[in-house]
Image (cartoon, rainbow, N blue to C red):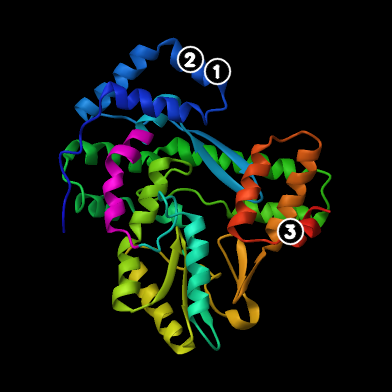
């Protein structure tokens, strides 16, 4: 297996460029002000990190959001965010070379749009009764094993300084404060929901969602929200992708992060694949969740990548319709920006949703 070295070329221009790019997505203007008040010093310190390979990840700002379900977000200060983006852009690009074409999450020119096109193409190639094995890894980001991931990275990256920085980022979820903060957020939100005026059904739904939010086990899990976490997560199961394509001989397979789909006319073959995938991922200390099942696509269609696919046509998922209606109401009141419309225009275009369907959704 080819290993990459001499990756370590990070100059002041690289840091400035990454900062300008990251700055566009930072909403907290106070963060920007504090960083730019000592701009030259901060850029110099970031350069020192890459020159020395010595790095300690600062504490995350951890908070809870609900859109549409509750989830934890781990936000970084600008200093750490710039380092994270540089690591993703300058070092982790080498991992892309070993990924299969149908691994379609967070990759340049290989994102959700390609996944939708591939899925349609696969459906059109199959005749007769079409089945899908749809598998979902249980709490994937929380269960990625640090030791296994670092070993996989060392097989691809030779530079010790790169590995040292990656190890610090990967192990940053081991801090005791992380779980303490998550537990406190969960407790506060539970109290808020219980005291709210929501109906009993909605209360129970939200309470269940909150209680299901996991905490980190020591030596497991990636920080939620990091750019490096996205890349490391698609890489962690790369060997599974190759196993499915090369050993199980699956012709029609797509993976989007922790969700995978294999299409076939042979239901028995998919049952065999399910057994083998279960066995394979156990070596990576992962398990499939209860959403994993074999579906008759010809009769039921299949929910994947935000759409419901049938042979010959595509529908918007009911959950997405409801979300769009809620957002549209806020947009009409001027509470959210035009970015919302632009984002959904891309979504509808990707799904080739006809105008008559849009009118039904909006009105």
Mark 2–mark 1 CB contact (< 8 Å): yes
Q: Secondary structure at mark 2?
A: helix
Q: Quadrant of the C terminus?
A: bottom right
Q: Nearer the viewer, residue 41 or 151?
A: 41
- Residue 106: image location, x then y, percent: 44, 50
Task: Answer whether residue 133 is visible to the viewer in this image.
Answer: no
- Residue 299: image location, x then y, percent: 64, 82
Q: Residue furthest front?
A: 355
Q: Residue furthest top?
A: 37
* Rendered view: 33 above or below 241: above
Give the mark nearest the N terminus, 3 or 2: 2
Q: Secondary structure at mark 1?
A: helix
What residue span does the magenta drawing correspond to?
85-100
Can you identify the residue that label 1 sits on? 30
Q: Is residue 24 left or right of residue 54?
A: right
Task: Answer whether residue 189 is visible to the viewer in this image.
Answer: yes
The numbered mark at residue 34 is 2
Q: Secondary structure at mark 3?
A: helix
* Rendered view: 280 above or below 322: below
Mark 3–mark 2 CB contact (< 8 Å): no
Mark 1–mark 3 CB contact (< 8 Å): no
Can you identify the residue that label 3 sits on? 355
Q: Quadrant of the N terminus?
A: bottom left
Q: Nearer the viewer, residue 219 or 247?
A: 247
- In which quarter of the view is residue 2 placed? bottom left
């Amino acid at each position: 297996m080819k290993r990459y070295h001499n990756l370590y070329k990070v100059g002041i221009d690289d840091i400035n460029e990454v900062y300008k790019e990251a700055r566009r997505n930072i909403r907290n203007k106070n963060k920007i002000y504090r960083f730019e008040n000592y701009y030259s010093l901060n850029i110099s310190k970031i350069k020192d990190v890459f020159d020395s390979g010595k790095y300690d990840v600062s504490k995350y700002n951890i908070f809870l959001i609900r859109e549409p379900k509750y989830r934890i977000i781990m936000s970084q200060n600008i200093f750490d965010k710039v380092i994270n983006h540089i690591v993703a852009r300058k070092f982790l690009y080498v991992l892309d070379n070993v990924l299969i074409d149908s691994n379609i999450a967070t990759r340049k020119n290989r994102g959700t749009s390609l996944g939708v096109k591939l899925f349609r193409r696969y459906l059109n190639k199959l005749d007769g009764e079409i089945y899908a094995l749809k598998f979902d890894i249980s709490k994937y980001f929380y269960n990625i094993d640090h030791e296994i991931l670092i070993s996989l990275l060392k097989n691809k990256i030779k530079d010790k300084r790169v590995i040292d920085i990656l190890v610090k980022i990967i192990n940053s979820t081991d801090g005791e404060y992380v779980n303490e903060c998550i537990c406190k957020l969960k407790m506060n939100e539970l109290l808020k929901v219980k005291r709210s005026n929501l109906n009993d059904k909605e209360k129970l739904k939200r309470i269940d969602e909150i209680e299901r939010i996991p905490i980190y086990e020591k030596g497991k899990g990636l920080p939620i929200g990091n750019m490096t976490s996205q890349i490391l997560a698609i890489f962690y199961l790369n060997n599974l992708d190759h196993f499915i394509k090369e050993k199980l001989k699956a012709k029609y397979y797509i993976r989007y992060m922790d969700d995978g789909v294999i299409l076939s006319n042979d239901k028995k073959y998919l049952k065999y694949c399910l057994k083998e995938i279960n066995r394979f991922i156990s070596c990576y200390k992962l398990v499939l969740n209860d959403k994993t099942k074999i579906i008759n696509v010809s009769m039921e269609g299949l929910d994947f990548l935000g759409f419901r696919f049938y042979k010959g046509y595509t529908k918007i998922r009911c959950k997405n319709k409801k979300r769009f209606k809620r957002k549209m109401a806020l947009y009409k009141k001027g509470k959210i920006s035009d970015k919302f419309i632009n984002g959904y225009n891309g979504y509808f275009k990707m799904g080739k949703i006809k105008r008559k369907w849009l009118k039904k959704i909006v009105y």
